[in-house]
Amino acid sequence: MSEIGILGIIQLIFLIFTILLALIYSIPIIFIRRFHTVNNIITANLCFAAICCAIYGTFLIITATFYPNVLYNSTICIIFNYFEVMPNLQVSLAIVEASVNRMCSTVYHTKPFLRTKKWATICIASQWSTGIILSLPTILFDESNCGEQLWRRIYKFIIIVIIPSIICLVNNIMIFKYVRSSTNRIQTSLENAKNNQQQHQHQHLSRRDLHLLRHMIVMFCIFVVGWSPINLYSVFVNVGSITSTIVSIFILLGDLSLLIDISNLFLYNHELRRYFREKICRRH
């Protein structure tokens, strides 16, 4: 078996596991009412974006393996170029959306609207609309060939990696500044010792927000580390062949980062983990 064949099989395994884990994570959130919280809905949306990305990757591998000539059809190329950008961008934007939601719920935690399903729906609809619109230039200004123009490779890198990184950085800075100022207020109130219950609540809020802040940072760093190499490489080198070993390795790294991010969701959702643990223990 060739090296590329082995890498392709490993990539398929990563993609299939990503789809399975995302489905396992999402199904209880969709069908069990007590999991219908804003944070859970938004992370389930991230799972759906990951499923779309993994399905596209699986379809591309199958097409490139069994029907390689199809990829050289100009119309098919335009379609593939669009869906090469859109699912990856949706994953990136879904993580950004989770970061925005965390920032709003932390900095503006007194706003009841931010804890409603309507807010979650607005966030998700905005994310998917933005991703679909931002992906359109890849087909609107296409020159009807299978090679990617330099502007499109740069555009992909900017919208998938650079802009989301900046937004997440700004959100995390705002959260950090808020938590830090909140901590300073707690210390002042501790000195005055006026309301112990309120102090405890603020301390709990700060610890919780810092914990979730670290979670968001870790997830986005994993995504950036995974998908930056292939996008950055494509800026300087025209990735015209999917059989290139270096390209396959970079794509494999991106798929691995997607799998790690979905697995990471289980580590931080203690309530969902407890639900699965109870289900498993009940069966045995």
Image (cartoon, rainbow, N blue to C red):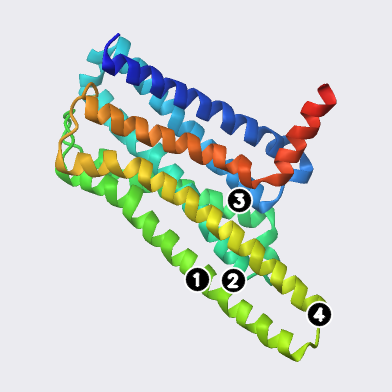
Residue 64 spot, x, y in % from top left? 29, 17
Q: Residues within 10 Å of mark 2 (few under 14, many from 20)?
A: some
Q: Secondary structure at mark 1?
A: helix
First in sequence, mark 2 or 1: give its number. Answer: 2
Tag 3–tag 2 contact (CB < 8 Å):
no
Find the distance from the CA under tag 3 to the CA under tag 1: 23 Å
Relative side of 215 to 67, left or right: right
Find the distance from the CA under tag 2 to the CA under tag 1: 8 Å
Between marks 3 and 4 in the image, the one whose residue lies nearer the viewer: 4
Q: Residue at x 43, y 38 (%)?
A: 257
Q: Residue under circle 3?
A: 121
Task: Tell me the tag on residue 109.
Answer: none
- Asked whether the viewer can see residue 198, the reply is yes
First in sequence, mark 4 or 2: give its number. Answer: 2
In front of the other: 138 or 94: 94
Q: Secondary structure at mark 4?
A: helix
Task: Tell me the tag on residue 196.
Answer: 4
Tag 3–tag 1 contact (CB < 8 Å):
no
Residue 164 spot, x, y in % from top left? 39, 55
Find the distance from the CA under tag 4 to the CA under tag 2: 22 Å
Amino acid carrying label 1: it is: Met
Find the distance from the CA under tag 3 to the CA under tag 2: 20 Å
Q: Residue under circle 2?
A: 107
**Quadrant location of residue 242?**
top left
In front of the other: 73 or 210: 210
Amino acid carrying label 3: it is: Thr
